[in-house]
Image: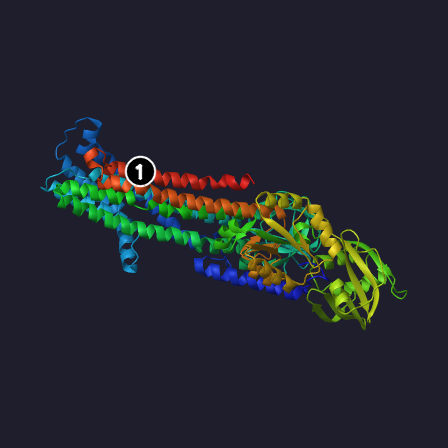
Amino acid sequence: MDHSHHNHHPNNERNAKGTEAAEKIAEKTLHAHNRAIPNEGQHPSGHGEHGHDHHAMMIDDFRKRFWVSLLLSVPVIIISPMVQDILGYRLEIPFNMYIAFALSSVIFFYGGWPFLTGFRDEVKKGAPGMMTLIAIAITVAYIYSTAIVFGLEGMDFFWELATLIVIMLLGHWIEMKSVLGASRALELLVSLMPSEAHVIRGGETVDVRIDSLQKNDLILIKPGEKIPADGLIEEGESYVNESMLTGESKPAQKVKDDKVIGGSINGTGSLKVKVQGTGEESYLNKVISLVQEAQKTKSDTQHLADKAARWLTYIALFSGFATFAVWLIIGAELAFALERMVTVMVISCPHALGLAVPLVVAISTAISAKNGLLIRNRTAFENSRKITTIIFDKTGTLTEGSHQLARIISFHPAYPEKELLRLAAGVEQNSEHYISQGILKQVKAENITIPTAESFNYLPGKGLEGTVEGRSVKVVGPNYISEFGIQVPESDAEEGVETVVYVLIDGTVAGFISLRDKIRPESAEAIRILKANGIKNLLLTGDNDRVARSVSDTLQMDGFLANVLPHQKQEKIKELQAKGEFVAMTGDGINDAPALAQADVGIAVGSGTDVAAETADIILVNSNPKDIASLILFGKATYRKMIQNIIWATAYNVIALPLAAGVLYKQGIMVSPAIGAALMSMSTVIVAINAQLLRSQIKNQ
């Protein structure tokens, strides 16, 4: 990413790579979710709805079953002999047992149906889990209570059956709503898109539906309007509010050739924009696809929760049947033995465990996306708690990456400063790198006509070369100069934080161009936060030693390495890993691909609309280094919440299960099915509340 001479990428090459990577991810995720991209005649707001119709219908179904079951449970509870005994009242109703049986039958078959079918599915897969446990508990309670109605001695469990089903329906309803809510929070981004766009055709402005926009269409965005598609500004200047897309609250100034994102809001200026991305190529679609992909990919912690739930199910089934058998063997009545078995199964139901991790995942993913953090690899995100060393790329991360031209020095009378700049621009126009843009910006400011370059060639980590007006022109950094032992006149250009590129014309060093890059105001705070959390930080840059030292010393970093080529970053990461360090790498996701892939956690920064850096685990939409520190701390908080929830959802069983089985029965301590249901419910509520507390974590960083 740094200019050593810089990691240049020709426009076409870079754009093709970024778009291709993004399209691969978007396409894969779009297919996985069966999401409908608006076609001709479809309103764009329909985007993404198809993939969630089924989920929304299931939520409606659970809601209906919950309310119907709750309504029917009230009379069942009121007429229950056990409840009457507990609360000390008498309510004589004719045929009360048959009324309870009839109402409970509806609750069992209607309210309990999702658990019965879930049990069937789990058995088919050979993976008994939570549904198996719930189904067995409610079936045992129903069959036993029915037998009592028709002559078996004992007290029925209809009210426990009813309350258990109602609580389980409520828990599932809450869980499904929360997961869908997280996805919909992202899909609401689509509602940011206007329904129409002003397209300029043949000198006239025509209003067309947004779904009919084509690449390279020229569109007009009036002051205060939403930008209808990704594109490049052809004409006009304005400030654009991108906060709902990137989390950056300050409106960004946009001028000619700057990128704009569909869904952001134009300020007071009028803009003419050439459309670059529509439909699934758009930034919004890529963001939604990436986040949905992350949501459906399970992390190591989630697999741990699944394992815990499965083992808890096995333990509960074994404990339940063992409790039943032991009590029968020692001479207890059938009703008492069954009651103990049902209570054990109710208490050990891993519903809270099933909720523990998905809730945290849903919340953390949504919060992250709203703050410009796109998580592609959830395991890497959770592993950010282990990071001991973070390697920073310099340009555009710790510094602003603006690279304003500082000076032009000519060493050759045939090539005065303006001519030197003109010829260099001929080669530089083939790159999107920050330094190239700095040189081109100066050329435009001086109204210099840029010549055409032929035989263009990118020299990785060293510079660019090409033929301009029949002359061989090389624009290279210190690495190239030292590698080929080229003698250059002495100058003070490398003092301070200037970055130098030399202009070689027909093999002669004609002069140099220096540029300055300003350290971001947030960088110092980011380094301070990392140090406070015991995380070492290193600067790796392709720039010269003095530039690197200046940035490192100013920010009080733990060290730096200058004049580093892209492949050397990967080697440095390997060295650190060999010493036992858990390394995070920040880079632009394309030039730094080998290093990002090698790092334990790869963080692509400053990606802008190139959100699909394939080698990165996490993508930061903004280049703000404080986001990196926040990301690591938020990853720690997320993991902490997951583990807390897993512990809470399972630990209470250690005490509750033996009590439910009746081990302290002779001491007069016994947990009833009602208390069992209440404990299980309380565990679920605590897990849900604990997950919600995560929302405050990122705000406090």
* Image position, residue 50 (x, y; %): 43, 55
Q: Nearer the viewer, residue 87 or 165?
A: 87
Q: Amino acid at mark 1?
A: Leu
| Quadrant in the picture for residue 247 | top right
**View extreme (front): residue:** 579
* Image position, residue 580 (x, y; %): 54, 56
Q: Nearer the viewer, residue 188 or 23?
A: 23
The residue identified by callout 1 is 679
Give the side of residue 233 with respect to residue 664, left or right.
right
Give the side of residue 420 with respect to residue 643, left or right.
right
Residue drawn at 61 percent across, 63 percent down: 571
**View extreme (right): residue:** 413
**View extreme (top): residue:** 89
Residue drawn at 35 percent across, 40 percent down: 683
* Image position, residue 633 (x, y; %): 54, 45
Residue drawn at 61 percent across, 62 percent down: 570
Please indicate, yes or no, whether residue 186 appears anywhere in the rendered image: yes
| Quadrant in the picture for residue 437 | bottom right
**If the image is split into quadrants, where does the C terminus sit?**
top right
